[in-house]
Image: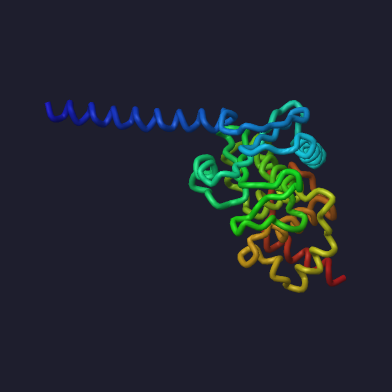
Amino acid sequence: MKIRLTRWLLLRMVGAVCAVFALYWALLCFPQPFFRSSVQADNLALYSDQSFAPDAGKKILETVEAKLAASPLYSSTERHSAFICNASWRQRLFFNRNYGVGGVNQYPLTTNIFLRDAVIEENRLVSPSGNQVPGDRTLDYFIAHEITHTLTVRAIGSLRYYKLPQWVREGYADYVAKGGAFDFESARNAFLAGAPEMDWQRSGLYLPYNLLVAYLLDKQQWTVQRLLESPPDQRAVEAQLRDSGSR
């Protein structure tokens, strides 16, 4: 009797866990009821839990699409949606254990991406300090960055994606998201000078990873497929970059 009761309780617990996971998966896939304002541009959509100017949102999506279209991994037939969580409780709900970061990608559970509070009319994400994120890391940058992660996983599969070195995984997303705003020569000079922003551990920026990816794709004429399927050692690429800068 005791064994049967224990098994029954165990099955109930497993069932409850599965039910919670299924509900959370459904929430990630269909979060639209929690976001009252939206705009769409072709296969991209932008949602927010606060009202925003539709023209400003559409302009951001058009910029995102132009950046993504430069990647051979992008297809205009695949739909992507970005959800701006201005309320902290929404960030906690949709970011889960990643609460506090700028944005999260929940693929393969969903192609939806979630970002923290933003000022859409100014194309700016708002940092945890309450200030707008400055420089070339615009709101469209964050959206394109997170969507590029989805494109990468789709291209090479989940297992190979999570085996990618961080500098390739984040560097390629940064490369696509920065688009024409990335200045290779300035970044290389900063790298050679040992500037703080070129140390990810100190700055938290993906700029050094972007530089390495740009060096291989733009200067060494690597294909994206080669980069993702046969990523070289980070230190070897850094050594090549230093050598090229001393010539």
Q: Percent position (x, y) of residue 53?
A: 75, 37
Decide which of 181, 1 is in the foreground and name it: 181
Q: Choose top left, top right, bottom left or bottom right for residue 189.
A: bottom right
Give the residue displayed 69% in from the left and 70% down from the top.
196
Q: Percent position (x, y) of residue 223?
A: 79, 44
Tell me if I can see residue 156 in this picture: no
Give the residue displayed 60% in from the left and 42% down from the top.
85
Q: Spot the residue most to the left.
A: 1
Q: Choose top left, top right, bottom left or bottom right for residue 238.
A: bottom right
35 versus 245 height, above or below: above
Decide which of 202, 99 is in the foreground and name it: 99
Q: Percent position (x, y) of residue 64?
A: 77, 40
Q: Quadrant of the N terminus?
A: top left
Q: How many marks?
A: 0
193 versus 57 height, above or below: below
Tell me if I can see residue 164 in this picture: yes
Decide which of 89, 20 is in the foreground and name it: 89
Q: Quadrant of the C terminus?
A: bottom right
User: Would residue 185 be found to the left or right of residue 116 on screen?
Assistant: right
Give the residue displayed 63% in from the left and 41% down from the top.
84
Q: Percent position (x, y) of residue 143?
A: 70, 43
Q: Spot the residue most to the right.
A: 247
**Coloration mode:** rainbow
98 versus 202 height, above or below: above
